[in-house]
């Protein structure tokens, strides 16, 4: 799970290095310009994936670093759909670490968006797919509401708690990280989030773990009417 500083740094590094990646040898007439394919494919990866801080490199015993290098394949990967106008394999590696992550990316016609067709073992291990709230909604299998402690009820505690939930390959919750919120509500929210279940996610033929944003909004009591809990996604 990444911090804001890490996200900005990784994005800057990606764009700086992606400008020098190997262009495709040939593209259909409706495909993005070859010089833009590298940066656009890297942008898709950065938008959809974050470093998995629970996975450590066997050489450095640390999570994957953000100062690695990006490149793309010269030839069209075999995993690419025939209907995809522009489809490349994107590589990310760090010289002092053993990981070499790769993703097969199919770009849309204008190159603004793309779909991840496949990924290798290192990408599966060292990175994690990140979902937006709207994307995550369709993966929720069961929900559990937080239980506010009696002291919280007595003082009409309210507010919003934002969480990041790491979902395992079978749909089970592996880890819950609190992003913000009142401490009293964070504990109740984390306990509830651990009991949520999700549907598995696949990339290609591979079942992968993924990260979901989860928000609990606690409304205060009004007179004798108990407040409500708004849950997203």
Image: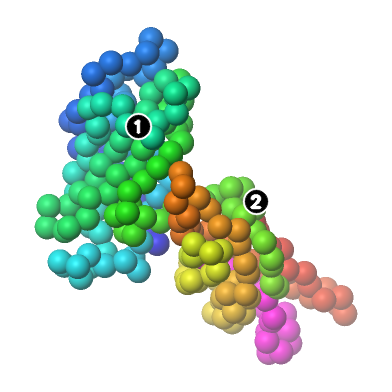
Residue that mark 2 sits on: 138
Residue 188 visible in image: yes
Q: Residue at x 32, y 54 (%)?
A: 121
Residue 209's spot in the image, x, y percent? 46, 59
| Viewer-proximal residue among 177 and 159 | 177
Image quarter of the N terminus? bottom left
Could you classify mark 2 by the number of other residues whose Cα lies within 10 Å: few (under 14), some (14-19), or many (20 or more)? few
Residue 18's spot in the image, x, y percent? 24, 34
What is the basis of the colouring in this image?
rainbow
Quadrant housing residue 140: bottom right
- SS at circle 1: loop
| Viewer-proximal residue among 216 and 37 | 37
Residue 24's spot in the image, x, y percent? 26, 22
In the rendered image, the residue lying farthest to the bottom is: 151
- SS at circle 2: loop
Determine whether, in the image, residue 231 is placed left or right of residue 13: right
In the image, is residue 41 above or below residue 7?
Answer: above
Q: CA distance from mark 1 to mark 2?
A: 30 Å
Determine whether, in the image, residue 195 is placed left or right of residue 132: right
Residue that mark 1 sits on: 78
In the image, is residue 53 above or below residue 15?
Answer: below
Q: Residue at x 29, y 38 (%)?
A: 90
Task: Find residue 119 and name its label.
Answer: none
Quadrant housing residue 19: top left
Residue 10 visible in image: no
Frontmost of labels 1 and 2 is 1
Q: Residue at x 58, y 48 (%)?
A: 135
Over which residues does the magenta segment extend?
146-165
């Amino acid at each position: 799970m990444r911090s804001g500083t890490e996200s900005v740094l990784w994005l800057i590094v990606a764009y700086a290095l992606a400008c020098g990646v190997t262009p495709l040898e040939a593209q259909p007439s409706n495909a993005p310009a070859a010089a833009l394919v590298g940066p656009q494919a890297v942008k898709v990866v950065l938008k959809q994936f974050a470093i998995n801080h629970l996975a450590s490199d066997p050489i450095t015993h640390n999570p994957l670093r953000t100062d690695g290098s990006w490149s793309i394949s010269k030839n069209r990967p075999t995993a690419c759909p025939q209907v995809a106008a522009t489809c490349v394999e994107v590589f990310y590696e760090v010289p002092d670490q053993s990981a070499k992550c790769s993703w097969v990316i199919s770009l849309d016609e204008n190159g603004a968006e793309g779909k991840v067709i496949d990924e290798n073992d290192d990408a599966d291990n060292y990175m994690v797919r990140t979902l937006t709230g709207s994307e995550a909604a369709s993966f929720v299998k069961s929900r559990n509401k937080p239980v506010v402690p009696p002291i919280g009820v007595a003082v009409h505690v309210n507010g919003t708690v934002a969480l990041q939930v790491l979902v395992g390959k079978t749909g089970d919750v592996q880890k819950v990280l609190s992003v913000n919120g009142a401490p009293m509500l964070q504990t109740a929210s984390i306990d509830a989030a651990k009991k949520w279940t999700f549907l598995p996610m696949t990339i290609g033929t591979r079942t992968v773990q993924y990260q979901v944003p989860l928000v609990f909004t606690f409304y205060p009591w009004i007179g004798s009417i108990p407040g409500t809990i708004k849950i997203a996604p």
